[in-house]
Image (cartoon, rainbow, N blue to C red):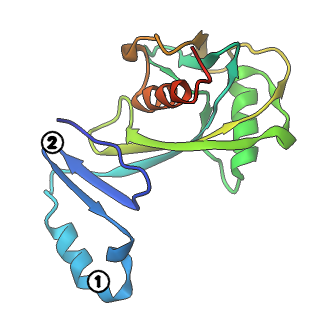
């Protein structure tokens, strides 16, 4: 069965055939015992961790831009993690400059959506939360730093070429009729 992504949940713990979602109700001060019981039911072999990332959703001519890191096989949505006290916008601008050699126009940065799933290439239980933005840019897109390849894709891109969050985003773009 594998992992099933949940949106709008505070915590997700999962293993094959067993899923426990700790929601806001469990976090109230009157529910401390309930929370403790919920966590005590989790197998000790499950390790959970979360990776929080930002991503640029760039669509041109009904195709989405994806990138592939050097030595990797899967394509992902360009972006990365915050450093220090960076805001989402500051981190996204820095990451796009590093990976794509372009400058985002800050006044055009707009929230797109949030996608959560099992993190690609990480141990089972490692979840990634991808907060996506759209924006315009100045400059010429070119792979830089750790990026080996940029590709414009449509909805017929093989799922095996993408991360789980990449598949989710691609399906979302298709459902909104933004890509072919």
User: Circle 1: is it few (<14), some (14-19), or many (20+) Cα within 10 Å?
Assistant: few
Counting residues from the start of the chain, the first of labels 1 and 2 encountered is 2
Left of 53 or right of it: where is 41?
left
Q: Which residue is tagged 1?
A: 32
| Image location of residue 119, percent across then percent down | 39, 36
Q: Circle 2 sits in a helix, a strand or a loop, which is it?
A: loop
Disc ID at residue 16: 2
The C terminus lies in which quarter of the figure?
top right
Apparent side of residue 89 relative to residue 172 in the rendered image (left or right): right
Whether residue 137 is visible: yes
Q: Nearer the viewer, residue 88 or 171?
A: 171
Above or below, 25 against 76 in this view is below
Q: 2 above or below 170?
A: below
Residue 38 picture location, percent across and down: 20, 70
Query: CA–CA distance between discs 1 and 2?
Result: 27 Å
Q: Nearer the viewer, residue 67 or 22?
A: 22
Determine crowd level at label 2: few under 14, some 14-19, many 20+ residues with C-alpha closer than 10 A. Answer: few
What residue is shown at x 40% (from left), y 11% (from top)? 158
Question: Circle 1 — which element?
Answer: helix
Q: Quadrant of residue 132?
A: top right
Q: Is residue 130 visible?
A: no
Q: Residue at x 38, y 40 (%)?
A: 117
Q: Quadrant of the N terminus?
A: top left
Percent of width and height locating residue 115: 48, 42
Determine the residue positioned at 74% across, 36% down.
94
């Amino acid at each position: 069965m594998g992992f099933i992504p949940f949106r709008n949940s505070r915590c997700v713990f999962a293993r094959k055939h067993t899923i426990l979602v700790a929601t806001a109700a469990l976090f109230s001060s009157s529910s401390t015992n309930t929370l403790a019981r919920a966590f005590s039911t989790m197998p000790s072999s499950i390790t959970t961790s979360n990776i929080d990332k930002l991503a640029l959703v760039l669509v041109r001519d009904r195709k989405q831009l994806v990138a592939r890191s050097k030595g990797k096989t899967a394509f992902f949505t360009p972006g990365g993690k915050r450093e220090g006290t960076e805001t989402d916008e500051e981190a996204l601008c820095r990451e796009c400059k590093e990976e794509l050699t372009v400058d985002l126009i800050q006044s055009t940065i707009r929230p797109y959506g949030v996608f959560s799933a099992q993190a690609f290439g990480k141990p089972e239980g490692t979840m990634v939360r991808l907060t996506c933005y759209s924006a315009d840019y100045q400059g010429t897109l070119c792979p830089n730093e750790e990026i080996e390849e940029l590709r414009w894709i449509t909805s017929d891109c093989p799922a095996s070429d993408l991360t789980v969050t990449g598949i989710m985003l691609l399906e979302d773009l298709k459902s909104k009729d933004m890509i072919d």
